Image (cartoon, grey):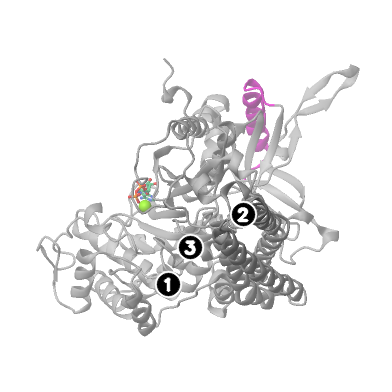
Amino acid sequence: METVADYFGSLVFNDNVMREKLPKDIYKTLRRTIAEGKDIDLAVANSVANAMKTWALEHGCTHYTHWFQPMTGITAEKHDSFVNPAEGGRVLLEFSGKCLIKGEADGSSFPSGGLRATFEARGYTAWDPTSYAFIRDDVLYIPTVFCSYTGEVLDKKTPLLRSMEAISSEAVKILSLFGDDVKRVITTVGPEQEYFLINKSDFVRRRDLIFTGRTLFGARAPKGQEMDDHYYGAIKTRVAEFMRDLDKELWKLGVSAKTRHNEVAPCQHELAPVFATTNVAVDHNQITMDMMKKVAERHGFVCLLHEKPFAGVNGSGKHNNWSISTDTGMNLLDPGKNPKHNLRFLLFLSAVIKAVDEYQDLLRVSVASAGNDHRLGANEAPPAIVSMFLGSDLTEILESIAAGKSAKGAQKISMELGVHVLPSFSKDTTDRNRTSPFAFTGNKFEFRMLGSSFSVSGPNIVMNTIVAKELRSFYEKLKGAKDFEQAVTDLIRDTYNAHKRIVFNGNNYSPEWLDEAARRGLANLRSTPEALDAFVAKKNIDLFAEFGVFSPLEMHSRFEILTDEYCKTINIEALTMRDMIVQEIIPAVSYYTSIMAQSINAKKTANPALSCKVERSLLEKISSLMDVLSERCDVLSSLIEKSKSHGGSELSHFCRQCIVPAMEDARKVADELELLVGRVYWPFPTYGDILHYVD
Ligand code: ADP
Ligand code: MG
């Protein structure tokens, strides 16, 4: 019988295939160029392209595509066939090194934030050899980066690669002080992906889901998630079939899907892969999200990746597990087993603590979106305040160092740095606090504020760059030190003392934390517009410019794109809501009232003595609620009109302060009506129908 091992990675032009298909010297050169992050020369590219083409044709491919990640948050592709007409009506199947390395993309319809005028709209895509090419639907997919002709970045991938370079070179310098011979350092990421699966037959009847990805209306169903019976619960047969199918597709594409389970909310599930190099993890997560949607269709489902598709039950997030490893396989966030490793670990840990404290705002921006605004601070989700959980053991050790005492570790191991060994922090002792937005979990950090639909690129660009920044300043402080170990200990102590306000091991969901965080001076950027303003603060522009991750121009363009995206999202939601009220809810409710009125008349005609109390009271209640709904809808309409006179950042604040609350007001009445109007008269499936479907 065919096992997973037989088909895992079978659609990937991976290292094994390359070794088999490429001439030995070409293979070696390619490996070296990839490892050192150098440019590929054309002769090598030609040879690789030829091997790729042969392999792709053997697998039935007809086309290739440069696959890229523009600022839309999803991926983009344009297919070119291998076909080239030749003499005598024949055809040549061609794919050159040039086509592999560089592609042209008319980028005028991709968001560029003013970076590119339409007359010079063409951008180009360039092969990223650090992520393997793969096959989907008879097309050879080549992972690429996307730039403008003047070199400005137009995608989410280029800055990520730049940030990986930044942290690598800074970490390598620090490691050299420890006497570690390391050439490259890579960051690793394992994103846990949450999603909802609902019946397609329900989806197609809800225009809010179709246009906005979330429900804009919906009264709470009698049953939500209060019984805690869905989390890790038995998986419905159809869902299990979907998961089996999904895993298989992902495995063929070399995505190491590992865990799958039901999540807290009804219809909510999760998939987590084994972690990979950040660059690959980002690509794989995009493939995973795409594949979830595709495979769902095959099973009569629709996969919702919105952060908050349903009010009153959990939203969907994505946990970004992040760590730093050397090319020699050492995880630098693993406390290690000997004093030297301990010291190195504590130094890298200090860099992360300082980075998260100094750039809380950037981390917050990296998870800001209209969708995630519903989630941050809401039920079972991290608050909008960034803080760090280290666990009591690790905090105790840092506190002791900070106090200048010899530390007492968890297992009462007295520890003087450089002499005794740190206790190892098992996941059990570090992962108890599920409320923290940024938790140390044994040998990695878990950033939990990401929304489920996000590309994981943004948050990792920030993580890599801010930690690179701190490592650079650490290196400057340590490089000439006479007593290196003492200097490292002093630095750990000073850093912790200066930045320990960011460490919070308590319950992040408690109301007291809000006050405590304010006392500590931590940022609380409640919504996307507030967060976005912080993005272009001078310190943040300087940071990215210093490491060449974003130029100031690119920062401003991103600010513009993100602001625009936010405003457009709210505008689409507001318009959808208005249409659904006017075209669906009011007609349905009005029809129901007419039934009520007819019933009263019919009863009176049949027998004037009959009671019509119920009908009368319902008729009154529903009619007056309908008036309120209509008024609120008018308010919403006039705000939509008014929004047209605003623009840019001002518009985003207007959306947040005026349109979002007006939508909430309108929804409240509509949801009240839903509970009064006869079930068969309601114009679209309810929460009860959608979330508790019968298989
Ligand atoms: P939990 O739900 O308890 O957080 P999971 O097993 O669902 O745990 O997810 C943990 C994720 O962290 C997995 O994707 C795993 O591969 C990833 N991970 C483990 N070690 C590392 C590491 N060193 N760097 C990045 N990610 C890691
Ligand atoms: Mg987790």
Tell me the tag on residue 385.
1
Mark seen at residue 73: 2
Q: 232 or 434, which lies in front?
A: 232
Residue 381 is situated, as x and y percent measured from the top left of the image, at: 41, 61
- Where's residue 157, x and y in %? 59, 53
At 58% across and 68% down in the image, what residue appears? Answer: 664
Q: Quadrant of the N terminus?
A: top left
Q: Distance of mark 3 from mark 2, alpha carbons?
A: 18 Å
Secondary structure at badge 2 equals loop
Magenta span: 40-61
Disc 3 and disc 2 in contact, CB within 8 angstroms: no
Residue occupied by mark 3: 375
The answer for how far apart the CA atoms under marks 1 and 2 are is 24 Å
Label 1 element class: loop
Mark closer to the observer (1, 3): 3
Residue 451 higher or lower than 414, as above or below: above
Q: Quadrant of residue 438?
A: bottom left
